[in-house]
Image: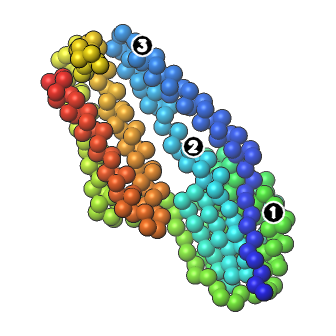
Amino acid sequence: MAEPLQEFVPARQRGVVLHAGLLLFFTAASGGFLLLALAQELRGFFILYLVGCFGTFLPIPLLLYRLFSLLRAKYVIDREGLHIQWGLRTEDIPMQEIEWLRPANDMPYEIPLPRYSIQGSIIGVQYSEELGKLEFVASDSSSLILIASKTKVLAISPADHKGFQRTFNRFIEMGSIAPIQPHSANVELLLTGILKDKYARSFMLGGLVLSIGLLLAVSFIIPVRDTITLGFNPTAETIESSPSDRLLLLPLFSLLMLFVDAAVGAYFFRKEGFKTASYFIFASALILPLSFILLIFFFVL
């Protein structure tokens, strides 16, 4: 009877608390800046608060991705090899290619961590004089395990690190019967695949060009118009005029939705059988800037 595979998860608690706290902070700050911007009557303060809104929003997609990656991360091991899942990254290492496994704390030298590492997201590449290139897919710097293969050294952090070592030793003693093929897929390869796909590339570039065009149009309108009127209310009456600098909200929302469409589309692009769905999501990046351009054409120009 074949030995069942064993699944281990990284230490999550501190990382989830930290990322959730940062997400709440930046979301509240971005929303607060937006409300302050909408409440301003002076053009200078409106633009200042709008810049603050955009600046505090920028970390949110990264934090969301890192939290998503941590919650679905796992290390799966059996007698054929090691499988690592971390966000959109997957790594398969055949057992016969693994040369050694050791806890980082047992090494006679310090293991350098990647830059900008925080608990829950110790991700990236770092170089060590003793080990060379180190690739981190870990969450806890205090329980790192180093796994050396023929091509690289990985640093992982299963919550049950002692159980992981026992399981690894048991499987490697049993030997491999049907070795798996080495495989590596990460975000960089995913982005390369999207850029090489003519449909995905065209939709995303189209959305970006339209958003930039919208920003340029708004930049020309604001200096020559003190106020603008955008549409009608439910009773078919013209909406009260607003300062023209409020038009900056349109390209801002358009760019933010472009980021969201790109992230969701990339998630489905990598899944087998969902490429067509990803094209529809990428194509939706064209809808909002086109709508805003038509809004300006009919109600502002």
Residue that mark 2 sits on: 63
Identify which amino acid the numbered label 3 is placed on.
Answer: Ala
Label 2 – label 3 distance at C-alpha: 28 Å
Left/right of residue 91 with respect to residue 79 in the rendered view: left
Residue at screen point 40% across, 47% down: 261
Q: Write down the quadrant of residue 16 in the picture.
A: top right
Q: Is residue 4 left or right of residue 127?
A: right
Lower position in the chain sequence, tag 1 or tag 3: 3
Quadrant of residue 246 in the image?
Answer: top left
Task: Give the quadrant of the N terminus.
Answer: bottom right
167 with respect to 205 (left or right) = right
Mark 1 → mark 2, Cα distance in angstroms: 26 Å
Give the number of the disc on residue 161.
1
Of badges 1 and 3, nearer the viewer stands 3
Image mark for residue 39: 3
The image shows a total of numbered marks equal to 3
Q: Tell me which amino acid carries mark 2.
A: Leu
Any part of residue 51 in sight: yes
Q: Residues within 10 Å of mark 2 (few under 14, many from 20)?
A: some
Query: What's the residue at 37%, 43% (across, down)?
Result: 258
**Residue depth check, mark 2 versus mark 3: number of the one nearer the observer:** 3
**Position of residue 250 measured from the top left corner of the image (x, y, whole percent):** 31, 30
Q: Residue at x 65, y 88 (%)?
A: 178
Is the residue 2 above or below the residue 225 in the image?
below
- How far across and how far down the image is residue 298, in percent? 16, 27
In x, y percent, where is residue 192? 40, 63
Question: Can residue 229 be seen by looking at this rendering?
Answer: no
- Mark 1 or mark 2: which comes first in sequence? 2
Residue at 56%, 27% (x, y): give it.
28
| Residue, far front | 235
